[in-house]
Image (tube, rainbow, N blue to C red):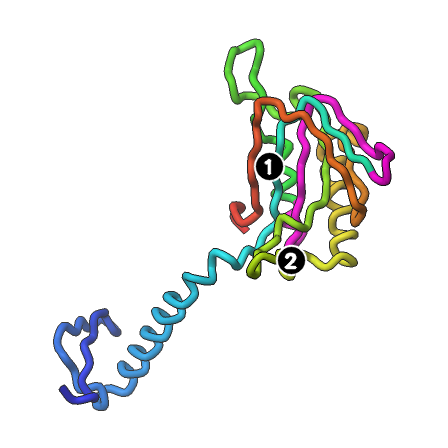
Amino acid sequence: MSSNLGFIPFQYQGLHFHKPLQLHKFPRIHSAIDRHKRHKRRNRVGLGRRKFLIKSMKAVIQRVASASVEVEGRTVSAIGPGLLVLVGLHESDLESDAEYICRKVLNMRLYPNEKSGKTWDQNVMQRNYEVLLVSQFTLYGVLKGNKPDFHVAMPPEKAKLFYASLVEKFRKAYNMDAVKDGVFGAMMKVNLVNDGPVTMQLDSAQSSR
């Protein structure tokens, strides 16, 4: 078959083509077909990468009976019943990502309602429990061979300010005294007693952003 012939499997400008066509006689249609093929090819190639292209803020939420953070042998933060939230910042995160994570974490119904008997019915605010936030860039670790790579995590200088603003969002949305955090960039020992165990994963790509 001549290279000038092509099968047109779609509608173009209201016309339906179901037979081979001499494309050189229809340059605009030829161009449309080329764009269509390139788009399909990019999608096929992108499928393998897409699972590694994470563009969102991550949070791992654990319902705890207690949790604390130690730095150089000193306890810098501690909570009783509540939520321990490990936060990973992506280099492309925006204020909308922080707002989504804050809203979702504080409203997650991870606690039973003792009055109604419903199992998953109340959030941390309704129980007047505490929240401990810990920055953890290793949530964006990708193995290259056996070595973790963190190149998609937000750079430390930018992340420090962004994380501080996230903590402030939690405090304004809930209670200043009920929200604690670790020490950004420090080597921390995080101790916890997981209550359940209950662990949830959340990322801002789930938002309508």
Q: Quadrant of the N terminus?
A: bottom left
Total residue callouts: 2
Quadrant housing residue 28 = bottom left
Percent x, y for residue 132? 73, 33
Q: Quick one: 62 or 14, which is closer to the camera?
A: 62
Picture residue at 65% right of the left edge, 21% below the top: 126
Q: CA distance from mark 2 to mark 1?
A: 25 Å
| Chain part drawn in magenta | 71-98
Above or below 41: residue 160 = above
Query: Which one is in front in this view, the residue at disc 2 or the one at disc 1?
Result: 2
For badge 1, the amino acid type reads: Lys
Picture residue at 68% right of the left edge, 22% below the top: 65
For badge 2, the amino acid type reads: Phe
Element assignment for label 1: helix
Mark sitting on residue 161:
none
Residue corresponding to mark 2: 150
> Mark 1 and mark 2 in contact (Cβ < 8 Å)?
no
